[in-house]
Amino acid sequence: MGNGTSIGRVRGLGSAKEGTHHWWHQRLTAGTNLLLMLWFFISIARLPGYGLDDVAKWLSTPWTALPLVLLVVSVFYHFRLGLQVVIEDYQHDASRIAALILLNIFTVGAAATAIFSILKIAFTGSLK
């Protein structure tokens, strides 16, 4: 008994129905990264000085802290989506699951550290 033709083996299996959702999130985060990075560079360029006190004062306002937290969330989510595709495309053995788990742990840990740092400066008004 044979395995049949190539089309016969895959007919009826359907798609995984995950690609569009992933693709759409990647495009949305790319757009938000573009807008928020544009805000970030303009905002940094408009600072009166680049000393620690000037940056801490700038970051302690809610009009700065909130977009900066949104930028961190968007950049790290985009980072995770992109590396997930690379891992899924090129890793084919059991280490694929471990790599995806490590990717998620690293992404959440790094983003949480950045957000904590931003909020600490925003709420205390200093870098110390």
Image (cartoon, rainbow, N blue to C red):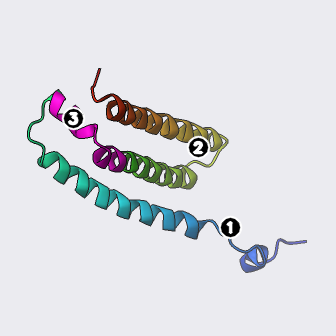
Query: What kind of element bears circle 1?
Result: loop
Look at the image and give the residue range highlighted in magenta: 53-68
Name the N-terminal-most of marks 2 and 1: 1
Residue bearing mark 2: 100
Considering every residue shown, the one lying at the far top of the view is 128
**Residue 119: x, y in percent?**
39, 35
Amino acid beneath label 3: Lys
Q: Residue at x 51, y 39 (%)?
A: 108
Q: Residue at x 73, y 79 (%)?
A: 7
Quarter-of-image position of residue 3: bottom right
Q: Residues within 10 Å of mark 1 (few under 14, many from 20)?
A: few
Amino acid beneath label 1: Ala
**Residue 21: x, y in percent?**
57, 66
Left or right, residue 54 beside residue 69:
left
Amino acid beneath label 2: Leu
Q: Is residue 58 magenta?
A: yes
Quarter-of-image position of residue 17: bottom right
- Quadrant the C terminus occupies: top left
Considering every residue shown, the one lying at the far left of the view is 48
Which of label 2 and label 3 is nearer to you?
A: 3
Q: CA distance from mark 3 to mark 1?
A: 49 Å
**Residue 18: x, y in percent?**
63, 65
Residue bearing mark 3: 57
Which of label 3 and label 1 is nearer to you?
A: 3
